[in-house]
Image (cartoon, rainbow, N blue to C red):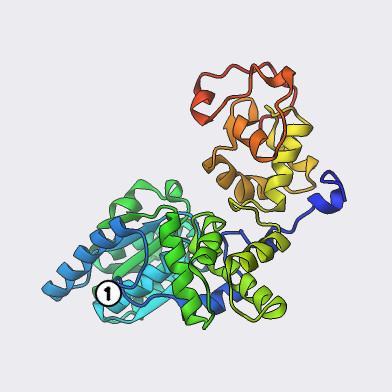
């Protein structure tokens, strides 16, 4: 089947092994694989060191810890860290999310039921409603909320005292948080993608917990294809485990890992078939760009939002393409990775790397730059 065929290009982003968002299987398995303390949490050393000091100081004072904001892409361990924070403080954990708090009353109900010192984990905090967000300001700063009774001129605000608590907010879009909310967090942890060595250690640890025998070279192979994300690494490990059980004796060696990941179309650096479809279309149909997002998405039979949020972040991070005022542009690295020669007509305007994009000049394009 040709790469350009619509059947090959059409991909369901929800079924992608390299998708950073969690599905039902991820949620059920991750609970068993999650570390329970900072000492057993692999990677993010800078965040661990800083957070450890915050928690130790709070425990020594016998008071609730400062509010903590965990910011970073999906799949890097924000939920796991929230559980560790509660465990390190020896306090219960309450879990909710921004989309669930669409009214001030929703937030008031959660806050009023907290016990002293409890840790409240608020996932996707950037998706809270404005009214709930304004109530949260007062709760975080003064441990108090005002309950409005009645309507119109006769409405009365009744103050409700709250027990001291620690809010742990998690967001993948820190830039969407208003300044007053960000300022109320005593500590902000910016989580980065993991190095291969850390991902390898996570794969080995997860394999041990799953009671799967794996070689060091196989763990390294999975780590290099995991896009620097523990969630993706654990998902790939489970698929390789299945392959080894069906096609072999259950032991994962490097040949078994390579065969499994080839079957699932995840290449040696973590690109899957949708990633390669986007690059292939950009290179062969549009000469490497510039081309608009919607035009590029239509060419691979996907929604523009899927291409922008699912494919582009990793392609940009790895230096295969960039967003410019004129549209998406591929670098020489993209041509090389797909084994394609840069056409003579594009030689003068295809940047060798992302740094060159700052000074690159592009001919006017009739493609939409969205």
Above or below — where is 101 with respect to 285? below
Q: Position of residue 300 (x, y in %)?
A: 78, 44
Q: Is residue 347 left or right of residue 89?
A: right
Q: Return the residue at label 1.
A: 162
Tell me if mark 1 has few (under 14), some (14-19) or many (20+) residues whose alpha carbon lies within 10 angstroms of its own: some
Q: Pick the residue in front: 201 or 81.
A: 201
Q: Residue at x 67, y 50 (%)?
A: 306
Q: Is residue 102 visible?
A: no
Q: Pick the residue in front: 207 or 158.
A: 207
Q: Is residue 137 left or right of residue 303?
A: left
Q: For the residue labelled by badge 1, is the local secondary structure a helix, a strand or a loop?
A: loop
Q: Is residue 78 left or right of residue 315?
A: left
Q: Position of residue 145 (x, y in %)?
A: 32, 68
Quarter occupied by the C terminus: top right
Q: Is residue 144 left or right of residue 245?
A: left
Above or below — where is 301 with respect to 112? above
Counting labels gives: 1
Q: Residue at x 58, y 33 (%)?
A: 323
Q: Position of residue 212 (x, y in %)?
A: 54, 80
Which picture quadrant has residue 321? top right
Above or below — where is 120 with respect to 13? below
Q: Residue at x 79, y 53 (%)?
A: 10
Q: Is residue 307 visible?
A: yes
């Amino acid at each position: 089947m040709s790469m350009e065929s619509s059947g090959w290009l059409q991909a369901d982003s929800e079924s992608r092994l390299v998708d950073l968002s969690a599905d039902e299987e991820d949620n059920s398995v991750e609970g068993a694989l999650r570390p329970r303390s900072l000492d057993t949490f692999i990677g993010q050393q800078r965040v661990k060191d800083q957070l450890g000091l915050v928690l130790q100081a709070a425990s020594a004072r016998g008071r609730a810890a400062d509010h903590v904001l965990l910011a970073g892409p999906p799949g890097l361990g924000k939920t796991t860290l929230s559980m560790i924070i509660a465990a390190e403080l020896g306090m219960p954990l309450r879990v909710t999310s921004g989309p669930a708090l669409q009214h001030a009353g929703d937030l008031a109900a959660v806050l009023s039921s907290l016990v002293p010192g409890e840790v409240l984990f608020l996932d996707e905090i950037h998706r809270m409603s404005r009214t709930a967000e304004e109530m949260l300001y007062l709760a975080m700063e003064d441990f108090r909320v005002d309950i409005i009774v009645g309507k119109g001129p006769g409405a009365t605000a009744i103050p409700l005292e709250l027990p001291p608590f620690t809010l742990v907010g998690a967001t993948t879009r820190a830039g969407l948080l208003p300044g007053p909310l960000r300022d109320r967090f005593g500590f902000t942890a910016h989580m980065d993608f993991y190095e291969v060595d850390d991902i390898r250690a996570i794969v080995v640890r997860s394999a041990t917990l799953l009671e799967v025998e794996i070689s060091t070279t196989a763990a390294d192979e999975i780590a290099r294809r995991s896009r620097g994300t523990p969630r993706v690494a654990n998902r790939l490990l489970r698929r390789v485990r299945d392959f080894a059980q069906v096609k072999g004796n259950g032991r994962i060696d490097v040949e078994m890992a390579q065969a499994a990941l080839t079957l699932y179309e995840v290449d040696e650096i973590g690109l899957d078939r949708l990633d390669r479809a986007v690059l292939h279309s950009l290179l062969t149909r549009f000469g490497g760009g510039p081309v608009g997002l919607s035009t590029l998405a239509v060419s691979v039979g996907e929604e523009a939002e899927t291409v922008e949020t699912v494919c582009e972040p990793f392609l940009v991070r790895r230096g295969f393409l960039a967003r410019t005022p004129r549209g998406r542009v591929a670098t020489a690295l993209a041509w090389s990775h797909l084994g394609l020669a840069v056409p003579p007509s594009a030689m003068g305007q295809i940047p060798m790397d992302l740094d060159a994009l700052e000074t690159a000049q592009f001919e006017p394009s009739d493609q939409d730059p969205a």
